[in-house]
Image: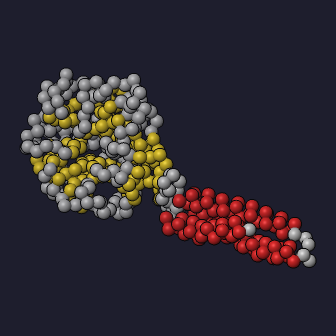
Amino acid sequence: MREFKSLIYPISVGLVLIPSTVFAHGGAEETQSGLPMSTFGLLAMGLLLILFIAFYMVVKKKVQGLKNVKKKEDRIKRQRLEKNLQLINWGWILSLIGVLITGSLSVMGDKLTVGKGTYLEHIHGLGYSTDGKQMIIPAHDGLKTYSEGHWGSAEGEKHDYMGFSSVDDGFYSSGHPASGSDKKNPFGIVKSTDEGKTFETLDLYEEIDFHMMGVGYKSHAIYVINPQPNSRMDYTGLYYSTDETKKWTKSAMKGISEEPTALAVHPSNETVLAIGTQSGVYLSKDYGQNFEKVFSKGQATSLYFKTNGTLFVGGYDKQAYLVELNVENNLSEEINIPDIKEEDAIAYISGNPVNGKEMAFATFKKDVYVSYDKATQWIKVADQGKGIDEKNH
């Protein structure tokens, strides 16, 4: 039984350390194998319980085999075995308690648990489905969805969408085809009305990839920053189309001498658009022919027109900020946002078209936040690209 005594000490230490480790990590973190700590603890405690029960049965059988208590040698062995049996009895009781504790942690979990299989390699936009039930993020390997506290992937091929713009009947985008797809590269401009299951090619297919593109949510007026001359656009710069790309018109962009950093189109008024630069926000009310500077606070990193026509400006001025701007009178109001890491800022903003209280934003370092109460409180649903499932709102 010396072998048993040499085992009982490390097993006892395990009984103490495993539950404390699980509690310390709260059940939400993962081991190197990818298992949540609570699940790892449950498996470990279950193994200990099985071992103790096996020891108990073996030792009890040996005790029952020593029937000749009058014989001194058998009597001494029986006494030792009975002491060991008591220790083992306590061992399986404690391990059973450990199973119950870690099992409860595994079932309940924390409020936040890592979303299985969801990783945002890149973030190329942010929007919502037309019914407002899903947040949609083009993430290099297809469209990722976030709905009712859980991450998922949209149906359809995993295309690398760029210049993604949600509208009232789907989305417009540019980009590149998924690996193994029979679609041509690049996309030019495409439109989907079934959340990416299929799409219709509109223009410049196999010619150009637009990284900076905006579309009116209701008007469907398309504005693009053209990076190079092509078969439909003779020059670089700002172009727009109000008829699903049948005709393109070059905008003069008078009043802007800086490189654009962001672009947003008014939801219903096709003549109105905003462009962000390193020094602020410019607004045009004549299809981009003339611009007036309407906001100055460091660099404008992202723009989003809410369905009611107010403009949200994400930017960086020594730290990240979010502002709501009334484009009719240029009055602005700072919006509460969570603490964002240094040297990070808001890259994309969007709002739920059905629920006006809900909005979301993504940062350049791939953190994603959502608010359900007009930015009073924010919930982090992705950390550096790693999706986080939210079990209870």
Q: In the rendered view, does 299 fall on the left or right side of 197?
A: left
Q: In the rendered view, does 380 fall on the left or right side of 223?
A: right
**Residue drawn at (15%, 56%) of the image:** 298
Q: Is residue 281 above or below residue 320?
A: above
- Residue 95 placement (x, y as % from top left): 66, 67
Q: Quadrant of the N terminus?
A: bottom right
Q: Is residue 83 above or below residue 39?
A: below
Which color scheme did the rendering employ for the protein? secondary structure
- Residue 134 placement (x, y as % from top left): 43, 46
**Residue drawn at (36%, 52%) of the image:** 384
Find residue 210 and report its image quarter: top left
Q: Residue furthest top?
A: 231
- Residue 172 placement (x, y as % from top left): 32, 35
Asked if residue 133 can be seen in this view, the reply is no
**Residue drawn at (17%, 30%) of the image:** 228
**Residue drawn at (35%, 35%) of the image:** 160
Asked whether 212 or 88 is in front, the reply is 88
Asked if residue 70 can be seen in this view, the reply is yes
Q: In the rendered view, does 217 fall on the left or right side of 11?
A: left
Asked whether 162 or 65 is in front, the reply is 65
Find residue 44 and report its image quarter: bottom right
Q: In the rendered view, does 376 fall on the left or right side of 60?
A: left
Q: Count the numbered circles shown.
A: 0
